[in-house]
Image: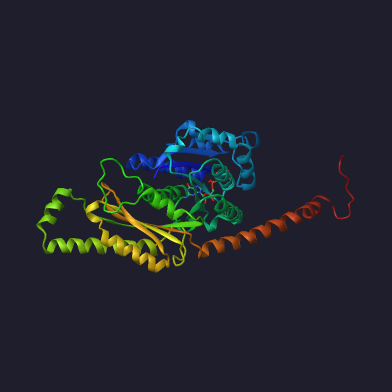
Amino acid sequence: MKLAMIGFGQAGGKIVDKFVEYDAQTGSQIVRAAVAVNSAKADLMGLTNIPKDQRVLIGQSRVKGHGVGADNELGAEIAEEDIDEVQGAIDGIPVHEVDAFLVCAGLGGGTGSGGAPVLAKHLKRIYTEPVYGLGVLPGSDEGGIYTLNAARSFQTFVREVDNLLVFDNDSWRKTGESVQGGYDEINEEIVKRFGILFGAGEVQAGQEIAESVVDSSEIINTLAGGGVSTVGYAEEEVEEQSSGGLLSRLRGGGEEDDLDTAHTTNRITSLVRKAALGRLTLPCEIEGAERALLVMAGPSQYLNRKGIERGRKWLEEQTGSMEVRGGDYPLKGRGIVASVILLSGVTNVPRIKELQQVAIEAQDNLEDIRSQSETNLHELVNDDEDELESLF
Ligand SMILES: Nc1nc2c(ncn2[C@@H]2O[C@H](COP(=O)(O)OP(=O)(O)OP(=O)(O)O)[C@@H](O)[C@H]2O)c(=O)[nH]1
């Protein structure tokens, strides 16, 4: 499916930048247009793949190109004030050629956290195409203010988008890694998962015809209905054979043929389980997910309808959902068979409840500190008996 991607803030910009790189490397053609919006000039200059004329600096009169310093209320305000400048960049997008918008942002900071929901609301008012969000939750070690920002932004962003796809930095960070190196790896994980998912609806000319190919409308229907989504992923390396070799073996028929089919089917069902029960972009209980989509990607000789059907049925049982779609995505040249599972409308998410709890504590703390601040400063600056006088 073809997307117009808008990265808001530093994390959002870097993720979209990575999507553009992925698109060029794999030819998956999911990024029809890419825009970066930020209040920090340096962050925009640090991008590599998004065209320079598609990078929009907002809030110059307020923050002089230096960012909003994790103040997401200010981030929301300047996004509203400068929405026409953002729209100016979006005007350059051939919207009739895109299936949906994807607004990406880290929810813990200021610019993206505050600005992304404002932009989503604006896009939904103007366009009929669905507007999805890709929201990144901060690590739990980032501190109270980031958690509070994320909890407030999450609440607003979910309301303003047609569906919020969530990625939780907390469950992906590795110890002993530099923050930057860590983010590079994390961003690759994000782009791989969402790249295959959205790429599934985009069959290119010359690609092998799949048995039951996933179409953009299936992704859109799985996301329709709103709420929060998470994505599971698992892959296995396979040897890519030329189709001629395999076909001639298949034509030979016999036991080897049955073995191949059984092996292919089993590989698919085990990859489906691994993807659903392994690390999700947002960890949650999969039971109760309202809708799901299973995409099996790989060389078409490693995909079969039986395996996908079994995987789909298993997902139906595990989620209890009646709306589980499934299909394949022929993907040559990567030497893998991969299973991507989109779980949409998830509601049993302990991580969000925990985030909200920490956010409320941080909010109460901040209020206490603010309310005492004037008294404390007065006590510090003035002597006990008020014997000293200020100069003027
Ligand atoms: N996955 C991922 N997360 C990131 C990356 N950079 C920052 N983050 C996360 O995103 C959150 C927000 O940070 P930024 O995007 O840098 O903030 P901003 O929107 O530019 O806002 P200000 O810097 O406050 O103006 C942080 O709390 C991190 O958790 C990145 O490259 N990848």
Position in image of residue 75 (x %, y %): 61, 44
On the question of residue 47 being in view, the answer is no
Total marks in image: 0
The colour scheme used to paint the residues is: rainbow
Residue at coordinates 63% horizontally, 38% vertically from top-left?
81
Q: Is residue 176 above or below residue 82?
A: below
Quarter of the N terminus within the rendering = top left
Between 356 and 379, the one nearer to me in the picture: 356
Say whether residue 278 is left or right of residue 85: left
Say whether residue 278 is left or right of residue 252: right
Between 367 and 381, the one nearer to me in the picture: 367
Residue at coordinates 26% horizontally, 44% vertically from top-left?
207
Say whether residue 388 is left or right of residue 324: right
Q: Is residue 116 above or below residue 138?
A: above
Quarter of the C terminus within the rendering = top right
Position in image of residue 101 (x %, y %): 48, 44
Between 207 and 112, the one nearer to me in the picture: 207
Say whether residue 254 is left or right of residue 317: left
Residue located farthest toward the top when viewing the structure as drawn: 53
Position in image of residue 5 (x %, y %): 46, 42
On the question of residue 294 being in view, the answer is yes
Position in image of residue 20 (x %, y %): 40, 40
Locate residue 124: give its quadrant: top right
Between 206 and 245, the one nearer to me in the picture: 206
Residue located farthest toward the left when viewing the structure as drawn: 252
